[in-house]
Amino acid sequence: MALSNADMQKQIKHMMAFIEQEANEKAKGIDAKAEEEFNIEKGQFVQTQRLKIMEYYEKKEKQIEQQKKIQMSNLMNQARLKVLRVRDDLITDFPLVKSAVQKEIPMYKIATKNDVDVQIDHEDIAGGVEIYNGDHNIKVSNTLESQLDLIVQQMMPEVGGACSGQMPTGSFWTKPSGGGACPQLSCCEVEASDI
């Protein structure tokens, strides 16, 4: 059976519409796939660039933190050096003491009408004054060491009492019964004659 020309045209149009619809669907599929791939690549690119930016700023932050630490260290060292310089200036007061003593000698001679021999011991003294009379048989000591010795002597009864658990009575105290050993320290045994 042969198709008429109109039927053939109709069938060709139908086939063309089908092919066109299939082509449109394939084109839409290709567009959708291309857009999906584009979005994936765009997302990967954005993520990569975001990571690069974050790494860049983390590096910058670490550099700034390192610079802060270096500056703080430099400031601390400068302050430490300044403190050491000031302390050294205070400790090395020998020239100041010498000039003050030299100023006072004439005033002493005028006031007492006696000669005076002043010697400054700048090696073996931590600070203070020792004064002797002309015969060297009377000594007045007001040095740091002599003050510490006085404090030790005054505190001896309290230290002994703390070690033995007893309190001093009057101007002396006695050795505790039971051997006199300190309950806390075995080396602490003090008698009234030791004070």
Image (cartoon, grey):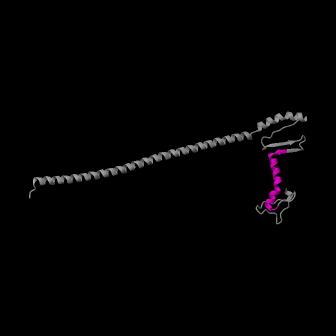
- Image quarter of the C terminus: bottom right
The magenta-colored residue range is 141-166
The foreground one among 84 and 50 is: 50
Q: Residue lying furthest left in this view?
A: 1
Can residue 114 be seen by looking at this rendering? no
Can residue 48 be seen by looking at this rendering? yes
Say if the magenta span includes residue 92: no
- Image quarter of the N terminus: bottom left
Q: Residue lying furthest bottom in this view?
A: 178
Residue 189 x %, y %: 81, 60
Residue at x 34%, y 49% (from the top left corner): 38
Residue 25 x %, y %: 26, 53
Residue at x 83%, y 53% (from the top left corner): 154
Instruction: Say whether residue 75 is left or right of residue 56.
Output: right
The foreground one among 23 and 57 is: 23
Residue at x 25%, y 51% (from the top left corner): 24
